[in-house]
Amino acid sequence: MIKAFNAWPEWARYGFVFAFALLFWSPSLFNEFAWDDTNNLVDSDRLRGWAAFAECFRHDAMWSARMNAAAIGTYRPISLASFVVDYQLFGGSAISYHFTSLFWHALACVVVFAVLRRFMGLVESLVATCLFCVVPVNAEAVAWVNGRSEIFALLFGGLGVVVATSPRLPWFVRLAGTAPLLLLGMLGKETGVIFCAVAVLLGTEARHRRVEAPRLWLRSLDLTALLSGVLALAGYLWIRHLVFGGNPLPGATEKLSSSADLMGILAQAASIVWKCFATVVIPDRISVGYLYNWAQALTRTDLIVAWSALAVVAAGLVFAWLRGHRLAILMLAWWGFSIAPVLILVGRDWPGLARWLYMGGPGLVAAGALLLRLVPWRTVTTFVGAAYGLVWSVQAQRSIEVWHDSGTLFERMIIEEPGERFGYLSLSWYYLRIADYPNSEKMARKVLELGPRGHDPLPFLAAALAAQDKCDEARKTVYEPTPMPTRAAWMMFSVGACYERAGRPADALPLYKDCVAGDKACESKAATLSASLASAAPESAEPSAPATVAPR
């Protein structure tokens, strides 16, 4: 087969990579919407008209879900704009969104193959690309519709690297092509900024290989790629300034506000690097990863061991560089750049891990293939590659099944991380949506047992109780022992509706009045009940039980 592949025309080789990626991830076509897909694509209608295409570039990423801007200042207009196109072309079915995600991922794999072909042999680049394609952690980016931003960052950022490393193009053509593509990568996702550095490193390597006389690697520095990266980054920051106003990085630098915060992040850095490496190499978890509790539990001994091990590996990499194995080190640097943002996100108590590893995956896999090539026993390298391909393929298919919907995803998460409240909280929300109110109540109470952190489970608990006609208990959840600082209109409406079903309109009225500012339905209900109670006989207007009104 390898001989036949060598004989194929170039377009057929790229076609093979595209078809392989599309076929491998095709089971995700049968997945439903999961997690934040519901906020963006089901509950909100902001991405359902052509006018929204331009609006996506004028707002933060939370705009489409009708939510406040995320603390990290997320801005991913290309991903949101692609949802607008999907809806206009195919409608709102989940399969259409999944199909286009698969299409873009397959194109990204083609781009990865093109980058690796610049520096590696045909068979090596094909094997590395196919291995990257089947990495299980990719499921969070590929099998989850909202993970598409990672794909666009790799697709456009990788294309920028392809242009930057094209030796036959004049410098001004490379500049004109690389800078816009790197900018598009960042507009796919903020962390696409890593490709500015990758373009410089691999562009320098490409120039160094064209020099006949041996010289220092840094003397081959690709100034065109460097200028492209600077222009792309400057353009991106300017666009963010226009969108967010003032600080172009709102919230993103909050965790670095003091020297203590910075030292805390640096202390955990080595441990997080190893955790990211292990997540790819030993993919035992296939649901949403959450590193906050893990990071908080790190001991000083853990930190010392991690830094010591990293120092030993760094020394080995320096030795490998001096021995001429630069490409493996550069590919590993590609992966290292991609996990740098994880250091901040872990400290910010942010859910997720696998999708953050997608953009650097090609670098890690390629570096592994290049380092394995140094092993003198070819049979060993072939066996290791085949074993990883098999294990990763099986786990990737299991991951696709886990991402079928929010229920399968978070049920698996609480199995893998039983001490993390986020899984129980998300399940409470999911059970509430599918009208499984007893289980929604159960999950919300489990969150309360695990202690305060993150989002408040009380709105879900109150709504679940109200749906089971436990009106007084639901009202007590809202107002006692201390009132909620923020009371969602939908929650107040559900408790008010509970009292209406129970024939207690006087108890329902205060709840409707408390949510009139946030919901038209509450306003309408409050007006109707007020008129009804005012026209009723005085004795029938009294509530059947003392109404508890929220403090003003």
Image (cartoon, rainbow, N blue to C red):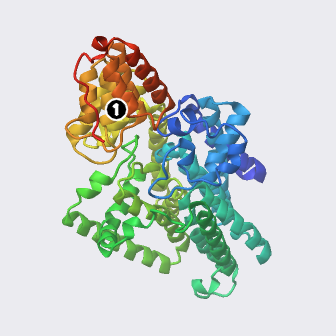
Q: Nearer the viewer, residue 468 or 350?
A: 468
Residue shown at 52%/73% (left/top)?
A: 325
Mark 1 lies on residue: 460
Q: Looking at the image, is 76 positioned above or below residue 209?
A: above
Q: Bin the neighbour count of mark 1 within 10 Å (Cα to Cα): few under 14, some 14-19, many 20 and up.
A: many
User: Residue 204 placed where, x, y %?
Assistant: 63, 77
- Quarter in which the N terminus is drawn: top right
User: Residue 129 placed where, x, y %?
Assistant: 59, 52
Q: Looking at the image, is 233 positioned above or below residue 27?
A: below
Answer whether residue 370 is visible to the viewer in this image: yes
Residue 391 image-quadrant placement: top left
User: Residue 235 placed where, x, y %?
Assistant: 65, 69
Q: Nearer the viewer, residue 133 or 159?
A: 159
- Quarter in which the C terminus is drawn: top left
> Mark 1 is on which residue type?
Phe
Which type of secondary structure does the marked residue at label 1 adopt? helix
Q: Looking at the image, is 320 positioned above or below residue 11?
A: below
106 on left or right of 361: right
13 on left or right of 73: right
Q: How many marks?
A: 1
Residue 50 image-quadrant placement: top right
Residue shown at 62%/64% (left/top)?
A: 242
Residue shown at 58%/87% (left/top)?
A: 216
Answer whether residue 4 is visible to the viewer in this image: no
Q: Nearer the viewer, residue 255 or 211?
A: 255
Residue shown at 69%/46% (left/top)?
A: 53
